[in-house]
Amino acid sequence: MQKYARIFESVRAVSPLVHQITNYVTVNDCANITLCIGASPVMSHAPEDVIDMAKIANAIVLNIGTLDPEQVEGMFVAGRVAADRNIPIILDPVGTGATPYRTKTAQQLIDELPISVIKGNAGEIGTLRGVVASVRGVDSGGVVGDRKTIVKSLAVEFGCVVIMSGEEDLISDGSRIVGVSNGVPMMGKLSGTGCMVSAVIAAFTAVASDTMDGCIAAMASFGIAGEIATETSVGPGSFKSAFFDAISALTSEQIIDRARITEY
Amino acid sequence: MQKYARIFESVRAVSPLVHQITNYVTVNDCANITLCIGASPVMSHAPEDVIDMAKIANAIVLNIGTLDPEQVEGMFVAGRVAADRNIPIILDPVGTGATPYRTKTAQQLIDELPISVIKGNAGEIGTLRGVVASVRGVDSGGVVGDRKTIVKSLAVEFGCVVIMSGEEDLISDGSRIVGVSNGVPMMGKLSGTGCMVSAVIAAFTAVASDTMDGCIAAMASFGIAGEIATETSVGPGSFKSAFFDAISALTSEQIIDRARITEY
Amino acid sequence: MQKYARIFESVRAVSPLVHQITNYVTVNDCANITLCIGASPVMSHAPEDVIDMAKIANAIVLNIGTLDPEQVEGMFVAGRVAADRNIPIILDPVGTGATPYRTKTAQQLIDELPISVIKGNAGEIGTLRGVVASVRGVDSGGVVGDRKTIVKSLAVEFGCVVIMSGEEDLISDGSRIVGVSNGVPMMGKLSGTGCMVSAVIAAFTAVASDTMDGCIAAMASFGIAGEIATETSVGPGSFKSAFFDAISALTSEQIIDRARITEY
């Protein structure tokens, strides 16, 4: 667990700049979680602006939660800058499988950019893998088949780290498969936890020497903060406040003590 | 009150998918309130995406709070799909009366789409009725004339349910007129309560056999949660957290005990 | 301090309408802070809508935090209406210095509109002054040179009030230089405090006979609310709730007792 805690400490020490092209639903939460984990957020989507912002970023997040053509163009422009600069590109394919436009856009982003991490729920990841999956709006309806096999084979196919979120998050870089079991059901009752964790993944992979390790540390840290927040909250409203407090006060000791990570 | 409580229970049981084309100011609150009431939110505005999202939705919300031509085009596209599929279309004509662009857009949406419910404050509803009304930005400045008559006649004219929000919400489908007196003044001090209730109305009408009953149940449930939230809050910030907690923990018993519904 | 408290009381009495063309990251917080201080917010960005909204506003905010060409066009259109009507125009040049598009847009807005107040961090203000400054995303990296001299000379050059936010906020109208030392470090750990204060400045300058005095009163009031909020919060999440509560409950007595204002 020590190595994961050290990545967390690096985020705090380095404060990587995370450029996020993301949806307007959860963008405020993404900005705040980025600050709380110790990194620095910047949001910018216009093709006129993203080149120069991506030039100074340490990682970028592409989240298609409320995509439109102008924003997607901004993602490709920023993504090419990120590719040239060899910084992590995190793709959150929100709602892939729910509409053809989302599915097609996610696939084009994967085809044309050297994505570092794809993070989605079972339905989204299953759709990208081409297996039977169901997505209802932006909620996962599940996937047919062995989840570990799907994640690993997708990681091999796309040459990146793939994260399928769920009760146990499954993470693979094509060779390792790791499960992270931190987190609480309340996180599913709050809009934006999926988007927020992508911002945290970006912050961790920006400073980690190994992208897979950065993803594991990010998923565990995020889930642990959720566990701590439930201790002092009674519903989604008070949970949200407590969650930002918890992730802001998170310590290496908490990560070492509480991380539930399984190497398969 | 039993029938209203049963509609609430249906929302929890069915978890209808509510597709929302809405403003970027309060969109996060709309997503969270939809989750808290037991439904599932999805936000999507681009004409490229909305057809397929509206195809899987159980109700749609059209909220013109921060309208622009692209978004309005998305509303018409999604609205026509919703019309074909016969799912409820909720119109929240935010700021109608404040600018000609808002008034014209609201009228066009009403003219071209089979709107199920129009929910606005006195100034907005009065403007749509063509009576003397005043709107200041997105705040109601009041309306001249008998409020009940205005609501009922507008419902007859447009062939839909009309809700004029206020200290007592007035609801009419053109034959019945019902008042709902739940709620607290604090709800007027928090941005987004008007938008949030439209999302809740969409969730309730998606599962109700009678649209008018769905609206009554929604307005009462929303107001009751507000009343409960004031018991543990001291200002708009703590009220917001407590409100999400309260609506998430709302029970049929609370609705039956606390609903203040008057049939006129 | 009496005169600053009286401006605050005027905001509560008059409830000025503050039209905000702003970023989608912190827009909900800006709407809520405007309500909490006692004013009325309205957000509208489309060129089709802004003329009529600016016609009824008492002040406008132009915040380039997530600018794009359509929004910038809306800023110019609204700004010209505001200029004709002689209402305060507040410019928040978010991220100026971080990208050429932001710097160029801020400069064009200043060149073409009679801006009343420019409020930025050291990096943003320094960039506009043409001194050596650094901006990292939307965070200030500091500025080379005497801060007071920079603020005053920029105020002279642009003929408006200039505010450089920081541990001590520096405010100048070209003749006076005033420092405001209210506020707490926690405000830097919450996304949107910089945007929110611009909304508060707009509300205060809308009712103040002297723009500089309105800015001083706004900065002090905002900082005092932050100080009060830290007394009952443990992290950024609980601080945010407490901050809205505190600014909503703010009194003239608190302003008189706690304002730390230095005339240089």
Image (spheres, coloured by chain):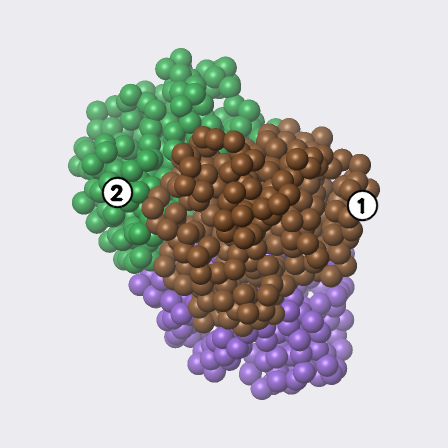
Chain colours: A green, B purple, C brown
Is B95 placed left or right of A111 in the picture?
A: right
Q: Between residues A254 and C67, which one lies in front from this camera angle?
A: C67
Q: Between residues A206 and C194, which one lies in front from this camera angle?
A: C194
Query: Can you say whether B85 is above or below B188 in the image?
Result: below
Residue B248 image point, x, y percent: 61, 47
Give, as a three-letter code, the residue at label 2: Gly
Query: Can you say whether B75 is above or below A219 in the image?
Result: below
Q: Between residues B119 and B245, which one lies in front from this camera angle?
A: B119
Residue at image mark 1 = C2
Q: Residue at x 75, y 56 (%)?
A: C10
Residue at image mark 2 = A79
Q: Residue at x 57, y 55 (%)?
A: C116
Quadrant where the C terminus of chain A lies? top left
Q: Element at badge 2? A: helix
Q: Is residue C238 visible?
A: no
| Same chain, labels 1 and 2 | no
Q: Residue at x 56, y 52 (%)?
A: C160
Residue B110 image point, x, y percent: 50, 79
Q: Element at badge 1? A: helix
Identify the image quadrant of residue C257. Answer: top right
Q: Which mark is residue C72?
A: none
Residue B101 image point, x, y percent: 49, 75
Q: Between residues C240 and B56, which one lies in front from this camera angle?
A: C240
Quadrant where the N terminus of chain A lies? top left
Which of the chains bears the disc numbered 1? Answer: C
